[in-house]
Amino acid sequence: MKKLSSQVMLFVCLLTTVTSSAQFGKLIDKVKGGGGSKKSGSFAVAWESEFDNKASRLAVAVNDGEYILGTDDNSATVLDATGNKVWSGDYKDITTNKTNKCEYQYIIHKGKGKGGYLFLFDARKMGTDRVAVIDIVSGKEMWNSEQYQNLIPKDGDNSGSDDGELETVKYIFELDAFLISQKESVILVKANTGEKIWETNRFKGSVGKYIYDAQRNEIIMINFKPTALGALFAGFKNQLVKMNAKNGEIVWEATFTGFIEKELVTRRAIVDLWIKGDKLFLYLNGLQVYNLNNGQKLWEAIYENDMEKSSGSSFLGNRSRKGFYRVMADPLFTDNAVYIVMLGNRDRTKYIEKHDLQSGKVLWTSEKITGAFCMPNIYLTGDKIMCQVGGKVEVQEWRLEKKVNPYGGGETQEWVPYIYWDYKTQKNGVLAIDDKSGTTSWRSEKFDKRITDFVLDGDKTLFVGDGDQFYGYDIKSGNQLFDVKHNDAGVGKATDVIDFNDKVVVLSEKGLASYNKKDGSRAYATEKIKGVDFFYKIGENYFLRDQRNSKNILHGIDMTNGDLKGSVESKGKGGSPEYGNGLDVSEDGEFIYAFKGKKVEKIKINN
């Protein structure tokens, strides 16, 4: 994924946020006039409409297209599902506290028929900061406040350093409330009225992750030190707390080991929480396990993580900075065990440990793998643990680029965010581990330059590519069933594999090649799509993503034959962070929303 917001993005469950300076969406070879007619290789336009404003910050489909929102610094326009205007207005006129130039804005999707909130934050360098919340359906102010200060950094250029989730404001979906971090306390307020529900000074910092227990009306939260308030905190400590959601009383409090990093572009906290039975599992450089009822730490399997040192997190020639993610597979849980990819502290090797879920006892440790930067996927199939050694990693990057202002004003430099998948030079291979003993059942190391993800056909067959070859393996024995010369397909090196019914479609540098699972024979090959680095399966539709040369293109593909349904290109911003600047996609994959300045198109994928 590429080109998210240059200002702010809030990722909370289904929450989608983007800010921007301008949007330019272009339907490639589209049929003018819309209405459903289309030609081969093109999409039809369902409708085209306009915002009253330039939609230079947020441009997104709310509640899966129930509403279409476009905002700039000072105003917003909302359209309905048919493209007709619902309301439009200036913030200074809508809000009673004259909230106006809003550096931070985000939209909360509450679901179809439930509306949503537009959260505005006006950080004033001179004077008191202002916040306001606007109802998406009516365009009316729900509440405003000048009570909350220091929610974001005010000094200096924060581009590329803290543009992302607003660390100090967390929306709790289950409570329909905002949790706001301040210097001395954390305050829970009703999202629709701003009324304070409770305030506690027992929890310091911002919420990195939370789990809501509806049965007991309790919240489990883990904190981290927010950049915005970092200088204000004294004696900050790592906290894991369980609290009564009604009154904010602490049920129990525990400490955790480690430091919570945030992703470079999305600014999502790199931490996870899971509840399994009467235990709470914290995933932060390994596992830390707690008694869910009293917070007592039961066992842990953790490692020191210095991945950030090798992630290029410092500026490179003052033009770029990178971070690498999705490097280690998530823990794999069964009813009585958990499998964890571990990182060796001294020799930086990687290996797998199987732990008893109740006691934490190490049941076995696999062989150690050296030279692999990542082990991104592990699977339990039959009596084997199948491990992907090496492969693609997610890259998040900020680049300093020259931009031309489409509304005049000449050329400027700005930090532009990119998210994409790439390969690093490393050791690659397939490793099969006996689930009972942890010993190696078989391995294949034929993958010199790269290895794709796996496609598993039950517990029988594993399919994988290396770039030039496509392989099938018998999972039980490790016997190679076939070895197909993928480079003969003429579509370039393999970059990914897609499980499609009785076939495996190999996404490649110049196109697609499809292979039959039964024998590896080639079903089709097409060179029509080049430069794709990511794919989506949305509903029953497949989309390929091209992000080369500052572009953002979505191709709709018929996977049965590789034919191109159509393509949409965006050269601007706005849209959903998941699909890139200027584009959003409906949950069923039947429509693409393309934003271009004041205009927005709803594009139909299928006849």
Image: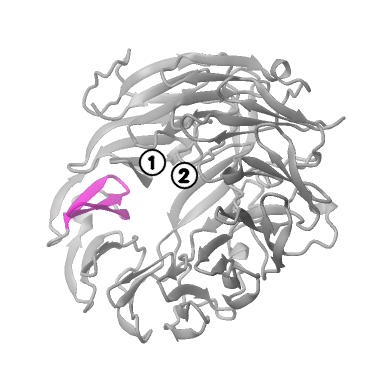
Q: Residues within 10 Å of mark 1 (few under 14, many from 20)?
A: many
Secondary structure category for the residue under label 1: strand
- Pinpoint residue 249: horizontal percent, then vertical percent: 74, 56
Disc 2 marks a residue whose amino acid type is Met
Q: Is residue 376 magenta?
A: no
Q: Nearer the viewer, residue 169 or 509?
A: 169
Q: Nearer the viewer, residue 15 or 548?
A: 15
Q: Is residue 514 magenta?
A: yes
Identify the residue position indicated by label 2 in the image: 1
Numbered badge on residue 545? 1
Write the start and end of the magenta stretch as one range.
Answer: 494-516
* Residue 304 in sight here: yes
- Pinpoint residue 4: horizontal percent, then vertical percent: 54, 39
Tell me which label, 1 or 2, sits earlier in the chain: 2
Secondary structure category for the residue under label 2: loop
Numbered badge on residue 584? none
* Residue 262 in sight here: no
Q: Main secondary structure of the magenta part?
A: strand
Disc 1 marks a residue whose amino acid type is Arg
